[in-house]
Image (cartoon, rainbow, N blue to C red):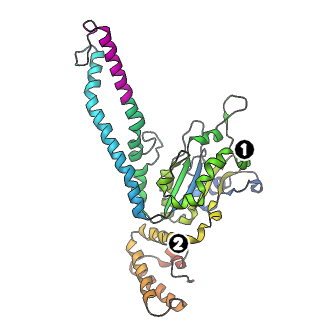
């Protein structure tokens, strides 16, 4: 499950409740500034687990899974190399630091310095050398060693509410033809959610003011709008969207796929959309996908992935491929595959396969939008 943000002073999301979370603002929704709307009911289970002091962007990554695998291997091998370097440095540094500790405690060790037998210049040189060693090791562990830790174990690993990292994300989600990407705003958003009080004491949540004056806000023009441009979202896979303004929210991506696998959401629910929580209106959404016209060009692959994920979640991935074979067999026969009769024959064969494998045909297809959701079977049943 995604973990709520733990910024100091961050408001805590209430427990999941369709009424309170999706419509928790007592004011009228008629004054919500464009282009925002109340978050759709379909996204309520998802946003109920998000921290309220960030912006979030959801989108669908339809790049080839082989390309995604190759791309992931780059940071994977880099972090493996960094891990080896850090562990090797720790290994060779332990005797030195242990010897220094012994000398501090008054015991003999190779690192003990006889201040009476060494001239001042030698002592200064040793002091500078050890200072540089301490600083170098600190920089290595604090600023470089943290990368593989967050990559393999996630952020805030040893806190009560850790966040997933890239490795857990790939282990949980795998590589799919259609993947859900969730981005979260970086620290620049603190100037909005924790704006300095006009009195100069403390901070105030200025998100309502920000939403009400979008077109005049620098952050809106320079950080949000470029991040949801159609070309950027279409050409970049999830990992390529990392930049100085947006980070990947791996816990959110795991949660989104889990909701899809559980049948609580359709994968289309996570098309390009900006999500933000306000005090006045509750959770708001800017459905960028409507402006992008995403509902048609990638519909087929998304539908196929949705159906495949549904069958895989119940251990019947082979049934998905068998369904594909039946449709391909029907379409490869002589004569047009346009009549309802031909398609009904294909559906009957698919139904038989479901029955043979003890899968409730009607229940499954009702959860993925009907058998007509299968590309090539545009009929009503």
Q: Residue furthest top?
A: 116
Task: Nearest to the eye among marks 2 and 1: give it.
Answer: 1
Query: In the image, is residue 147 part of the stretch drawn in magenta?
Result: no
Looking at the figure, which quarter contains the C terminus? bottom right
Query: In the image, is residue 118 part of the stretch drawn in magenta?
Result: yes
Query: Would residue 12 be found to the left or right of residue 134 on screen?
Result: right
Residue 47, visible in the rendered structure: no
Picture coordinates of residue 185, whole percent (x, y): 57, 46
Vertical placement of residue 215 versus 256, above or below: above
Query: What residue is shown at x 40% (from left), y 76% (from top)?
Result: 321
Quadrant of the image occupied by residue 291: bottom right
Query: Would residue 259 be found to the left or right of residue 196 on screen?
Result: left
Vertical placement of residue 279 versus 37, above or below: above
Image disc number at residue 50: none
- The magenta stretch spans which residues? 114-136
Decide: few, some or many residues near mark 2? Use Cα within 10 Å; few <14, some 14-19, many ≥20.
many
Earlier along the polypeptide chain: callout 2 or callout 1? 1
Decide: few, some or many residues near mark 1? Use Cα within 10 Å; few <14, some 14-19, many ≥20.
few
**Residue marked by disc 1:** 209
Under circle 2, the secondary element is loop
Q: CA distance from mark 2 to mark 1?
A: 40 Å
Picture coordinates of residue 129, whole percent (x, y): 33, 21
Under circle 1, the secondary element is helix
Quadrant of the image occupied by residue 116: top left
**Residue marked by disc 2:** 368
| Front in this rendered view, residue 308 or 79 | 79
* Secondary structure mainly formed by the magenta segment: helix
Q: Residue furthest bottom?
A: 335
| Front in this rendered view, residue 367 or 178 | 178
Residue 298, visible in the rendered structure: yes
């Amino acid at each position: 499950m995604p973990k709520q943000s733990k910024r100091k002073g961050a408001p805590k999301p209430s427990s999941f409740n369709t009424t309170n979370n999706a419509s928790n603002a007592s004011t009228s929704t008629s004054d919500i500034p464009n282009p925002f709307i109340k978050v759709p009911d379909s996204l309520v289970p998802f946003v109920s687990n998000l921290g309220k002091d960030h912006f979030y962007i959801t989108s669908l990554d339809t790049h080839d899974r082989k390309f995604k695998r190759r791309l992931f291997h780059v940071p994977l091998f880099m972090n493996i190399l960094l891990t080896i370097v850090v562990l090797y440095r720790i290994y060779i540094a332990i005797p030195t630091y242990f010897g220094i500790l012994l000398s501090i405690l008054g015991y003999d060790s190779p690192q003990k310095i006889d201040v009476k037998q060494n001239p001042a210049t030698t002592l200064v040189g040793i002091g500078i050398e050890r200072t540089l060693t301490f600083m170098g090791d600190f920089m290595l562990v604090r600023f470089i060693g943290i990368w593989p830790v967050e990559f393999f174990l996630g952020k805030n690993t040893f806190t009560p509410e850790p966040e997933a990292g890239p490795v857990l994300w790939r282990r949980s989600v795998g590589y799919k033809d259609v993947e859900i990407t969730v981005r979260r705003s970086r620290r620049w958003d603190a100037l909005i959610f924790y704006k300095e009080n006009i009195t100069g004491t403390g901070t105030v949540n200025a998100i309502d003011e920000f939403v009400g004056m979008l077109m005049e806000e620098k952050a809106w023009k320079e950080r949000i709008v470029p991040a949801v441009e159609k070309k950027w979202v279409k050409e970049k896979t999830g990992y390529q969207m990392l930049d100085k303004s947006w980070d990947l929210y791996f816990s959110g991506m795991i949660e989104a796929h889990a909701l899809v696998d559980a049948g609580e959401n359709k994968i289309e629910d996570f098309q390009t959309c900006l999500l933000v929580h306000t005090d006045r209106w509750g959770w708001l959404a800017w459905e960028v996908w409507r402006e992008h016209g995403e509902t048609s060009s990638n519909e087929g692959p998304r539908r196929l992935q949705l159906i495949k994920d549904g069958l895989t979640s119940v251990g019947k991935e082979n049934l998905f491929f068998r369904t594909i074979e039946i449709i391909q067999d029907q379409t490869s026969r002589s004569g047009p595959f346009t009549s309802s009769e031909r398609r009904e024959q294909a559906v009957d064969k698919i139904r038989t396969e479901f029955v043979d494998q003890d899968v409730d045909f009607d229940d499954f297809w009702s959860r993925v939008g009907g058998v007509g959701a299968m590309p090539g079977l545009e009929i009503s049943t």
